[in-house]
Image (spheres, rainbow, N blue to C red):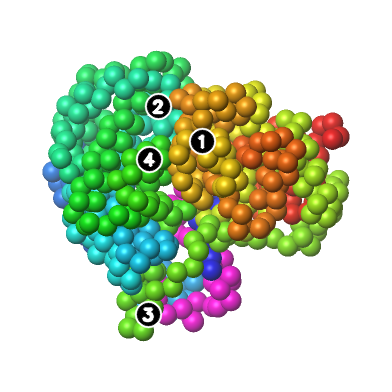
């Protein structure tokens, strides 16, 4: 019924704080108060995790002293006294249940799918004390069978290279994926030397190269010796940086494909659900689909830790004696929503000139703006849960003009010029523009653009000839689908460039005010808020 990340309310990206606003929103959406809630579920077993943290701290003491001093405040301030805080701050009186982290990831992935049974593969940086797990989902049950123990972690390896390349850890990983298209994987064997590999896909991180247990720098001096000195954020990106990004991406894909083959063989299932932060790696997701190791690959809209919270609640729900598996079609429209009256009130109160149009005029006007290479802010319905904007809080542009990408990166999003943009495509037309695409309803997969089509849609073709796509099925009978339809009718292109409605370093906009502020201070030309249209610069 409702799911939202706290960052959308506090406007602090990846806000790790106590999610008071998100909880209050979900209660309000459910039409209940805290006293009516039967159970609160948390996606981690704190004691197991804390045990691992202490254990690693002792192993690296005294090197780890400075690093460890930062840890206790959150644990003693928020996690251990969780039940008391829930009671004090939000008046919850119910029990609090703690579920294993990877099991929660697995539950969210499997229960969000429409599979009766399937293999489940979870890979992230670290859960309590494991970094990858696989298992099986069947009916109301999800069971994990094997795990890769921390500190041997594909997620931590990828994040360490992200840090070495001068990007923010737990945030810049997507940037590395984009950068990888500009390089050659010449460092793969060097990475393999630091992280020896096994047939089941697992790895062993040699401790002399990794410092994430005792330093915020993540990598040791020895890693810099065998690769190169860590890039500082303000320093230019050189070819060697692109090559290292390409190498870690290739290494990750190779390992994950090996893991997938192992899981396929062990479980015998021909369907798989992916969970954990690695399932945000859309390049891998596309390749896994293309390799046909599994007949079907399902990735939910929020495979990272936000979805994990939903997973823990689903675990509790399906443990009830009378539980029956409910399979509703999975979607991401679970966040905030504003009525046209609320939008009008905001615009009138602020004195913002605007026009309100019926649907057909609105669609014609927005499609015309896209055709004229204008950049359109598109705000409709409920905000998406997860990192991808899927036509509810999106910035849109025509895919047909190469220069749009530069304008979007520099004048609208304020981010690096090499960052690619994805596309929302009419599902039934995807095969005309992309090679062997499958359904990708949450913009979770990357596919090659057909060579003969690349010149027609240059703004969404990445350096390596790929594009991350969001397939919009005919069954999605909403304004967004109709907008792509209208654009298709006028241009012959069944797709639009779609990027999330936010500026660099900020969370996706939640309400009309944030959308307008983002529009006003960026290079967007037009803003569509519900049925209201706000223009900037020259009239259409
Ligand atoms: Fe996780």
Position of 4 compared to 68: left or right?
A: right
First in sequence: mark 1 vs mark 4: 4
Q: CA distance from mark 1 to mark 4?
A: 12 Å
What is the secondary structure assignment of the residue under circle 1?
Answer: loop
Q: CA distance from mark 3 to mark 4?
A: 36 Å
What is the secondary structure assignment of the residue under circle 2?
Answer: helix
Q: CA distance from mark 1 to mark 3?
A: 41 Å
Q: Are marks 1 and 3 in contact (CB under 8 Å)?
A: no
Q: Crowdedness of circle 2 by 10 Å Cα count: few (<14), some, many (20+)?
A: many
- The residue identified by callout 3 is 323
What is the secondary structure assignment of the residue under circle 4?
Answer: helix
- The residue identified by callout 4 is 290
First in sequence: mark 3 vs mark 2: 2
Position of 165 compared to 501: left or right?
A: left
- The residue identified by callout 2 is 180
First in sequence: mark 1 vs mark 3: 3
Picture residue at 66% right of the left edge, 50% below the top: 481
Q: Crowdedness of circle 1 by 10 Å Cα count: few (<14), some, many (20+)?
A: many
Please give the label number shown on residue 434.
1
Question: In front: mark 1 or mark 2?
Answer: 1
Position of 133 compared to 78: left or right?
A: left
Q: CA distance from mark 4 to mark 2?
A: 19 Å
Question: In front: mark 4 or mark 2?
Answer: 4
Percent position of residue 539, x then y: 86, 34
Q: Which residues are magenta?
A: 14-40
Question: In front: mark 3 or mark 4?
Answer: 4
């Amino acid at each position: 019924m409702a799911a939202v990340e706290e960052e959308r309310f506090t406007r602090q990206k990846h806000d790790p704080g106590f999610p008071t606003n998100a909880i209050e929103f979900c209660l309000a959406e459910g039409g209940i108060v805290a006293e009516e809630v039967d159970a609160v579920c948390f996606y981690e077993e704190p004691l197991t995790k804390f045990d691992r943290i202490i254990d690693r701290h002792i192993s690296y003491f005294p090197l780890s002293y400075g690093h460890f001093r930062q840890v206790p405040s959150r644990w003693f301030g928020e996690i251990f006294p969780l039940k008391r805080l829930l009671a004090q701050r939000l008046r919850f009186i119910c029990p609090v249940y703690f579920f294993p982290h990877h099991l929660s990831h697995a539950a969210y992935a499997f229960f969000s799918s429409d599979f009766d049974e399937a293999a489940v593969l979870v890979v992230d940086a670290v859960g309590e004390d494991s970094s990858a797990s696989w298992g099986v989902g069947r009916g109301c049950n999800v069971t994990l069978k094997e795990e890769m123990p921390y500190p041997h972690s594909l997620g931590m390896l990828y994040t360490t290279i992200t840090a070495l390349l001068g990007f923010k850890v737990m945030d810049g990983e997507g940037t590395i994926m984009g950068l990888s298209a500009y390089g050659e994987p010449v460092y793969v064997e060097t990475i393999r030397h630091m992280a020896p590999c096994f047939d089941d896909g697992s790895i062993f991180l040699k401790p002399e190269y990794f410092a994430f247990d005792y330093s915020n720098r993540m990598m040791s001096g020895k890693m810099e010796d065998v690769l190169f000195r860590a890039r500082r954020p303000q320093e230019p990106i050189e070819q060697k940086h692109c090559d290292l990004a390409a190498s870690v991406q290739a290494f990750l894909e190779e390992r994950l494909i090996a893991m997938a083959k192992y899981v396929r063989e062990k479980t015998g299932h021909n369907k798989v659900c992916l969970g954990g932060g690695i399932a945000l790696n859309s390049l891998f997701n596309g390749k896994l689909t293309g390799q046909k190791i599994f007949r079907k690959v399902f990735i939910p809209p929020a495979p990272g830790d936000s979805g994990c919270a939903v997973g823990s609640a689903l675990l509790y729900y399906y443990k009830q004696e009378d539980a029956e598996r409910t399979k509703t079609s999975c979607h991401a429209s679970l966040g905030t929503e504003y009525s046209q009256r609320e939008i009008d009130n905001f615009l009138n109160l602020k004195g913002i000139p605007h026009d309100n149009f019926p649907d057909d005029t609105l669609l014609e006007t927005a499609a015309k703006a896209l055709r004229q290479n204008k950049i359109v802010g598109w705000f409709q319905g409920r905000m998406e849960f997860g990192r991808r904007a899927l036509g509810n809080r999106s910035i849109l542009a025509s895919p047909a003009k190469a220069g749009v990408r530069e304008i979007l990166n520099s004048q609208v999003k304020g981010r690096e010029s090499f960052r690619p943009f994805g596309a929302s495509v009419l599902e039934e037309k995807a095969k005309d523009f992309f090679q062997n695409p499958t359904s990708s309803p949450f913009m979770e997969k990357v596919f090659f653009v057909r060579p003969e089509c690349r010149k027609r849609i240059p703004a969404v073709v990445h350096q390596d000839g790929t594009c991350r796509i969001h397939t919009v099925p005919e069954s999605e009978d909403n304004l967004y689908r109709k907008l792509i339809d209208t654009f298709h009718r006028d241009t012959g292109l069944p797709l639009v460039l779609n990027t999330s409605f936010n500026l660099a370093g900020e969370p996706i906009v939640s309400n009309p005010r944030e959308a307008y502020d983002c529009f006003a201070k960026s290079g967007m030309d037009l803003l569509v808020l519900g049925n209201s249209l706000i223009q900037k610069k020259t009239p259409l």
